[in-house]
């Protein structure tokens, strides 16, 4: 599934860049970002429906017909955007990055599970540092670059990329944590916990489509700053949650729109800045 996602996400964005003009691109990238974020929230709801009615494996199997249907629709309706200049792959860089990032993810999991000062956790972090350093050195000397690190010297690309990583990281972390909160603290079942994530899906789709208009009024830099600020406020409010916040007793958790809207507002603009800097 990870390989499939890694192939699909860049391909969809490249199709938008090749099909739509420079003037149309911000709105399309905004819609792309909104639906990408909303998909995470809708997936939680769909998972809740399946877990209420079937066994846990149905959460995996439901993706098979969806993937087949999407493949048929893409084949029949999406224009080809193949690059006629074939660029060789970078297998060494790919392996180094996969092992390095995998080790980092496992280190974070181990740290949360067994403690950050444990030998195993530190060892995984050291391994991640070694492989990612090796990847950096390799990318600086190989002719067939997996990623041109010189792009990060351009402020729009570098800052946009870092903010994208942070934005997506905290968004998925929020979905994971908030679902656990609804399920284990509030005592909701899988479906109810998923439904309580529904406001995120709606706000992301709506606000992401409006982000180009916001940028036209206050500038891209101002819109990105506004989005990140709203996201920060939303998470500051989330930090006030305690086990005593009971929805059924009238104590609503902090407004999810602050975090969701802010991320949706800024994410499409960050992608557009990264794409523009790389071209």
Image (cartoon, rainbow, N blue to C red):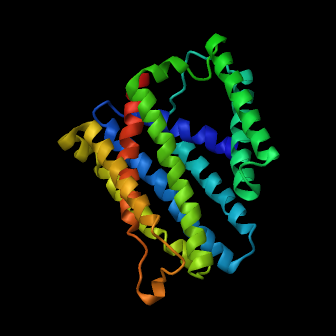
| Image vertical order of residue 154 relative to residue 212, above or below | above
Residue 270 percent location from the top left of the image: 39, 38
Residue at far left of view: 217
* Residue drawn at x 36%, y 58% as measured from the top left: 233
The answer to which quarter of the image holds residue 187 is bottom right
On the question of residue 172 being in view, the answer is yes
Which residue is situated farthest in the bottom direction here?
249
Is residue 18 in view from this perspective?
A: no
Instruction: Name the quarter where the C terminus is drawn.
Output: top left
Q: From what the image shows, is residue 174 above or below residue 101?
A: below
Residue sticking out furthest to the right: 120
Q: Give the mark count.
A: 0
- Residue at image position (72%, 40%) is 102
Give whichever of 97, 271 is nearer the camera: 97
Q: Is residue 62 above or below residue 219?
A: below
- Where residue 257 appears, as percent x and y from the top left, is 37, 64
Judge from the rendering whether residue 114 lies leftward or rightward of residue 205; answer left or right. Answer: right
Residue in view at x 39 percent, y 53 percent? 232
Above or below, 130 relative to 194: above
User: Residue at image x 55%, y 41%?
Assistant: 9
Q: Position of residue 140 (x, y in %)?
A: 62, 14
**Residue 76 spot, x, y in % from top left:** 53, 44
- Residue 256 is drawn in which quadrant? bottom left
Q: Nearer the viewer, residue 111 or 35?
A: 111
């Amino acid at each position: 599934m990870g390989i499939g996602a890694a192939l699909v996400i860049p391909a969809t964005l490249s199709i938008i860049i090749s099909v739509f003009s420079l003037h149309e691109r911000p709105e399309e990238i905004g819609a792309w970002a909104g639906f990408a974020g909303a998909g995470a929230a809708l997936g939680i709801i769909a998972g809740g429906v399946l877990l209420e009615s079937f066994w846990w494996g149905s959460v995996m199997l439901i993706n098979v017909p969806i993937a087949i249907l999407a493949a048929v629709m893409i084949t029949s309706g999406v224009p080809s955007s193949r690059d006629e200049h074939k660029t060789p792959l970078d297998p060494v860089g790919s392996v180094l990055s996969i092992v390095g990032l995998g080790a980092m993810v496992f280190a974070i999991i181990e740290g949360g599970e067994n403690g950050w000062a444990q030998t195993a956790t530190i060892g995984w972090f050291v391994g991640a540092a070694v492989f990612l350093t090796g990847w950096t050195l390799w990318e600086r000397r190989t002719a067939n670059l997996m990623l041109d690190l010189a792009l990060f010297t351009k402020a729009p690309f570098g800052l946009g990329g870092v903010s994208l990583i942070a934005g997506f990281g905290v968004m998925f972390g929020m979905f994971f944590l908030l679902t656990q909160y609804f399920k284990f603290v509030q005592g909701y079942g899988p479906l109810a916990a998923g439904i309580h994530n529904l406001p995120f899906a709606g706000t992301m789709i709506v606000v992401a489509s409006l982000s180009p208009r916001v940028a036209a009024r206050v500038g891209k830099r101002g819109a990105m700053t506004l989005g990140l600020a709203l996201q920060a406020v939303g998470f500051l409010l989330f930090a006030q949650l305690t086990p005593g916040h009971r929805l059924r007793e009238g104590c609503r958790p902090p407004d999810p729109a602050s975090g969701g809207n802010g991320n949706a507002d800024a994410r499409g603009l960050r992608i557009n800045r990264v794409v523009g800097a790389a071209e």
